[in-house]
Image (tube, rainbow, N blue to C red):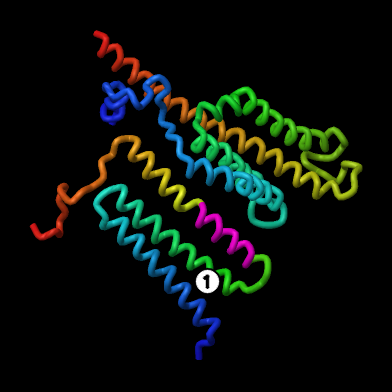
Amino acid sequence: MVTLYEGAVLALLAGGVFFGVVAAVGLLRMPDLYTRAHAASKADTLGAGLSLAAAAAVLASSLPTIKAVLLLVFLFLTNPTAAHAISRAAADQGIEPWTAEDGGGGDGK
Amino acid sequence: MSTPESEPVTSEDGDTGDSDRTLYVESPIIMGTVRVVAPFVFTFGLFIMFHGADSAGGGFQGGVIVSTVILMLAVAFGVESTRDWVTPERLVAIVGVGVSVVLLLGIGTVALGGSFLEYDVVPIDHFNKYGIELFEIGIGVIVSGIVAGLFFGLAAGASGDQRNDRDADEREGLL
């Protein structure tokens, strides 16, 4: 029998794994740097965040939980900033974003 | 690789500011995040350094994390302005301080009649612990200085290449 506490931890972990898989699929399937950064940063932030939240809930003692929560906070701060820096540097280098005219494999051609 | 980078620099659009064009792009988001995060990263590096004696961590890992602060500042506020602040002479001085701390610890115990890094011969209470921590801090200072110096060396290579490309393109444009 799964208690409510274990169920919450399992749900957090499942969400983290789901968003990690979404990030990996987006990284492999998206056509160019901007869309890949978009998929990877959004889903990766949530995936790592939910996994860390599950870890913080499992540890349930004072000091490791505080460390996990601090990790969570700084991950939420730095991960989007890193994606922003990469995309901004790419835009400054003159890399053109992918558009529908560039053609994709699966848009009904 | 070099032609698509150097073409917009020398092309006729004057808004790029071709006098001081580098790889640096000013971004308020990156600057704000670095302002918030840098002190915590520095503290975390010191934490790792001090915990090398009795848990995971140590001078090498902590030194790399501390030097990451300088890398972050360089990415956020520009390599050139950061190099004006942390000059190569200062980096050499920092590394020199670290080396002298470690050497003093090692040879000082020999001078006091013990063997290399035998802290027990120092007539201070609990110098075993202080000595280990001092040694870790010395290593951390050396590593952070070296890693920051390597980063500045790599950055100088990148900007120097670009400057040479631009000079060559300008010469072609003049001719």
Q: Mark 1 lies on which chain?
A: A
Q: Position of residue B10 (x, y in %)?
A: 30, 21
Q: Mark 1 points at which residue?
A: A54
Is B28 on the left-hand or right-hand side of A86? Answer: right
Q: Residue at x 8, y 57 (%)?
A: A109
Report which quarter residue B89 is drawn in.
top right
Q: Relative to A9, say whether A108 is above or below.
A: above
Report which quarter residue A71 is drawn in.
bottom right
Q: Relative to B156, say whether B71 is above or below.
A: below
Depth order, front residue of B51/A64: A64
Q: Position of residue B115 (x, y in %)?
A: 81, 40
* Furthest-bottom residue in this view: A1
* Furthest-left residue in this view: A109
* Number of numbered discs on residues: 1
Secondary structure mostly seen in magenta is: helix
Report which quarter residue B163 is drawn in.
top left
Question: Magenta residues, as a range?
Answer: A65-77
| Magenta span includes A71 | yes
* Furthest-front residue in this view: B15
Q: Which residue is drawn at 51% across and 53% down?
A: A77
Q: Position of residue A9 (x, y in %)?
A: 51, 76
